[in-house]
C-alpha cells in the first residue's frame, strides 16, 4: 500500500510537470493554432539562466545563488522575455501561415535555442544544486512523503487555480477565451490580437519558468536538450486531452504522468526498458477509442 | 435621405480575388447615415465577401472603402471595429463556451466606460428578453434564434453606429426571422443605427430596406430604392440573369 501511494505521488508529481508544459502548449494552440515545440526549450533557458555563462564543466551559480524571492521573479522574467522574443522574431511574421508551417517554425526555434545554449555553455551536462533542501522526506500521518513532489503538486494546483481565475474573472482573460474559440470574430469585435497573443506567450513563458525550477531541483543536472522530452510528452498530453481544450491539456498531462510512472513501477523488469513504447501504445489505443481526445473541442461541434 | 450628403460608407471599384477566383468585380455602393440598405443575391454571389472586405476580414485587390472619411483598405479588423463598424457574420459566430453575458461583454472589449457598459448590457437585455434569462448560460446552449439575437446584441455593445448583418435569416424558422427583423428595424429607430444587410431572398427585405442592390456573380446587377423595385420584376431578372441567358442562347 505504501508502495502504491509512493507511486501515485510520483505519478501526480510527474503529471504536474507535464500538465504545466501542456498548458503552455495548449494555450498557444488555442489562440494561434501553433503547436509550439519550443515550449520545452523555454524550460531549458530558465534552467541555464541560473548559472554563469561559460563552457566550463563545473557550473557556477549566478542568479541561482540568489535567495528565492529574487530568484523566482528574475528567472520568470527572463523566460517570459525569451518567449515574447520568439513571438516577435519568428511567429509574428508568420501570423497568416498555416498550422503545419507554424509547427515547423517552432522546431526551428527549438533548434536555434538548443544550439545557442550549446555555443554559450558547451555540450557537457552540468551538475546544479538548486534548493536541495527540498529533496527530503516529511512525515505525514506515519507516511514518509517526498517534500519536492508534494511541493510540485501543490504549486501546480495553485498555478492552475490562478490561471483559471485569470481567464474567468478578468476582462483580458475573457478576451483570451473568446480569441481561442474564434480569433477572427474576436478581432471583428475589436479585441486586440497582439495583446491576446502576447499574453498567451507571456503565460507560456511563466509556466515554463516554474517547470524549470521544479524539474531542475529534482534532476540536478543541466543539458541543452533537457526540455525536449518534456515538450514531447506534453504534446502527447495535449493531443490525448483534446486539442484546444485547456482542461483537456491538464487532464492529459496528469494521465501521461500516471501511465509512464505506473508502467515504470509495474512492468516486469525485463520490459521496463520498453516503457515508452508501452506508454505510446496506450496513447495510440486511447486515440483509437476517442479520436477527438478526452475533452472534445467545442469549436468542432456544429452549431445550429 | 439627402442624396447630396456625404455617405457614411462608400465602396468604390472594389475587386476581391481568392487566388484565381474573382469574388467581386468593380463593386461600388454607398450607404448614407440612418439608411437600411440591403444586398440581395444568390448563394456564392459575393455578398459575404463584400461585408468581410468592409469589416477587414478580406483584403481587396483594388478599390476603396471609406467609412466616415477613413480609408478602411488594409486596416486590420480590430481597427475597423474601433472606428465604429460592427459585423454580425453569417452563421453568427457566437463564442459557445463563453456565457451569454460574456459574449456581450466581448463586444465592449475596447470600451473603458464601465458604468456605461453595464447600462448597455441592461439595454440589450431589454431588447432581447430571452437573453436576460440565460445570461449565465454557455452561449452554445442557446437556440438558433437566440444566438442570432446574441450576435446582434454583441454588435450593439460595441456602440458602433453602423452594423453589417450577413444573412440574419440563415437557418431560422420564418416566425423567428420575422422577430429578428422586427428587432433590427426597431433598433434602427431607437439606436439610430445604419444597417447594411445581406439576404438571399428579397421578399422580406423589400418591406424593410430603403435601398436595394442586387449582386450576382461578383457584380452589382441592379440598384434602386425599395419603391422603384417594389413589384419585384426587375429584381428577379437581375437575380437570375434572364437577359444574359437569353442572349447566350440566341
Image (cartoon, rainbow, N blue to C red):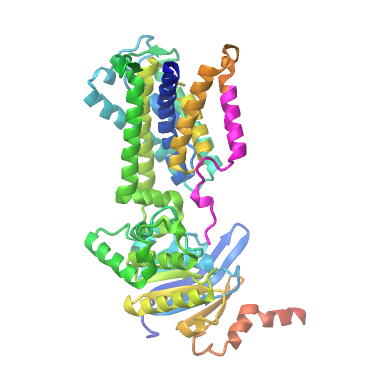
Residue interval drawn in magenta: A277-304
Q: Quadrant of residue A1?
A: top left
Q: Nearer the viewer, residue B144 or A76?
A: B144
Q: Nearer the viewer, residue B148 or A3?
A: A3
- Residue B203 placement (x, y as % from top left): 55, 82
The residue lying toward the viewer, choosing from A103 and B203, is: B203
Please state the horizontal and vertical placement of residue B105, each as a whole percent of the image.
33, 59
Q: Quadrant of residue A12?
A: top left
Across and down, in percent, residue B10 comes to 43, 73
Relative to B235, say whether B135 is above or below.
above
Tell me the residue at 60%/15% (across/down): A271
Answer with left or right where residue B101 lies relative to residue B248: left
Residue B35 position (above or below residue B129): below
Question: Is A166 part of what is drawn in magenta?
Answer: no
- Spot occupied by residue B108 in the image (x, y as percentages of width and height): 32, 60
What residue is at 25 percent from the left and 58 percent from the top?
A: B112
> On the rendered image, what quadrant is the N terminus of chain B found in?
bottom left
How many marks the image carries: the answer is 0
Residue sitting nearer the eye, B243 or A144: A144
- Left or right of residue B47, residue A74 in this image: left
Residue B39 visible within the image: yes
Residue A109 visible in the displayed image: no
Q: Residue at x 37, y 25 (%)?
A: A212
For the C terminus of chain B, the quadrant is bottom right
Q: Residue furthest right?
A: B250
In the rendered structure, does residue A296 fall within the stretch colored magenta? yes
Amino acid at each position: 500500500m505504501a508502495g502504491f501511494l509512493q507511486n501515485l505521488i510520483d505519478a501526480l508529481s510527474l503529471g504536474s510537470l507535464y500538465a504545466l508544459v501542456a498548458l503552455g502548449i495548449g494555450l498557444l494552440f488555442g489562440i494561434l493554432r501553433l503547436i509550439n515545440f519550443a515550449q520545452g526549450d523555454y524550460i531549458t533557458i530558465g534552467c541555464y539562466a541560473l548559472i554563469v555563462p561559460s563552457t566550463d564543466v563545473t557550473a557556477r551559480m549566478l542568479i541561482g545563488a540568489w535567495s528565492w524571492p529574487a530568484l523566482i521573479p528574475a528567472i520568470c522574467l527572463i523566460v517570459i522575455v525569451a518567449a515574447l522574443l520568439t513571438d516577435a522574431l519568428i511567429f509574428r511574421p508568420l501570423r497568416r501561415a498555416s498550422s503545419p508551417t507554424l509547427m515547423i517554425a517552432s522546431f526551428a526555434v527549438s533548434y536555434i535555442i538548443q544550439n545557442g545554449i550549446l555555443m554559450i555553455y558547451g555540450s557537457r551536462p552540468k551538475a546544479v544544486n538548486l534548493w536541495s533542501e527540498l529533496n527530503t522526506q516529511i512525515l505525514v500521518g506515519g507516511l514518509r512523503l517526498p517534500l519536492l513532489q508534494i511541493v510540485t503538486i501543490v504549486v501546480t494546483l495553485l498555478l492552475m487555480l490562478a490561471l483559471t481565475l485569470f481567464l474567468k474573472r478578468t476582462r483580458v482573460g475573457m478576451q483570451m477565451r473568446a480569441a481561442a474559440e474564434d480569433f477572427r470574430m474576436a478581432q471583428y469585435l475589436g479585441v486586440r490580437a497582439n495583446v491576446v497573443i502576447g499574453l498567451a506567450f507571456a503565460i507560456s513563458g511563466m509556466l515554463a519558468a516554474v517547470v524549470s525550477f521544479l524539474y531542475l531541483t529534482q534532476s540536478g543536472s543541466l543539458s541543452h536538450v533537457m526540455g525536449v522530452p518534456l515538450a514531447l510528452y506534453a504534446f502527447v498530453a495535449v493531443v490525448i486531452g483534446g486539442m484546444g481544450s485547456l482542461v483537456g491539456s491538464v487532464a492529459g498531462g496528469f494521465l501521461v504522468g500516471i501511465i509512464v510512472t505506473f508502467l515504470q513501477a509495474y512492468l516486469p523488469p525485463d520490459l521496463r526498458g520498453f516503457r515508452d513504447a508501452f506508454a505510446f501504445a496506450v496513447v495510440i489505443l486511447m486515440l483509437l477509442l476517442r479520436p477527438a481526445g478526452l475533452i472534445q473541442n467545442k469549436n468542432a461541434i456544429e452549431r445550429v | 435621405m439627402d442624396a447630396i450628403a456625404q455617405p457614411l460608407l462608400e465602396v468604390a471599384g472594389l475587386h476581391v480575388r481568392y487566388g484565381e477566383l474573382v469574388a467581386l468585380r468593380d463593386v461600388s455602393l454607398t450607404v448614407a447615415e440612418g439608411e437600411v440598405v440591403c444586398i440581395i443575391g444568390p448563394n456564392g454571389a459575393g455578398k459575404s465577401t463584400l461585408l468581410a472586405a468592409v469589416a477587414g476580414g478580406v483584403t481587396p485587390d483594388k478599390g476603396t472603402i471609406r467609412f466616415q472619411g477613413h480609408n478602411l483598405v488594409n486596416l486590420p479588423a480590430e481597427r475597423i471595429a474601433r472606428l465604429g463598424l460592427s459585423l454580425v457574420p453569417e452563421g453568427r459566430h457566437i463564442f459557445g463556451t463563453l456565457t451569454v453575458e460574456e459574449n456581450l461583454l466581448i463586444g465592449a472589449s475596447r470600451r473603458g466606460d464601465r458604468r456605461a457598459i453595464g447600462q448597455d448590457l441592461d439595454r440589450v437585455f431589454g431588447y432581447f428578453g430571452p437573453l436576460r434569462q440565460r445570461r449565465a448560460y454557455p452561449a452554445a446552449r442557446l437556440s438558433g434564434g437566440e444566438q442570432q439575437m446574441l450576435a446582434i446584441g454583441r454588435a450593439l455593445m460595441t456602440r458602433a453606429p453602423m452594423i453589417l448583418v450577413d444573412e440574419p435569416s440563415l437557418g431560422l424558422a420564418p416566425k423567428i426571422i420575422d422577430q429578428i427583423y422586427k428587432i433590427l428595424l426597431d433598433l434602427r429607430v431607437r439606436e439610430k443605427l445604419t444597417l447594411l444587410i445581406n439576404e438571399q431572398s428579397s421578399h422580406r427585405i423589400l418591406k424593410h430596406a430603403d435601398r436595394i442592390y442586387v449582386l450576382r456573380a461578383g457584380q452589382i446587377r441592379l440598384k434602386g430604392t425599395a419603391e422603384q423595385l417594389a413589384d419585384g420584376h426587375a429584381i428577379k431578372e437581375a437575380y437570375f440573369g434572364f437577359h444574359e441567358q437569353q442572349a447566350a442562347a440566341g
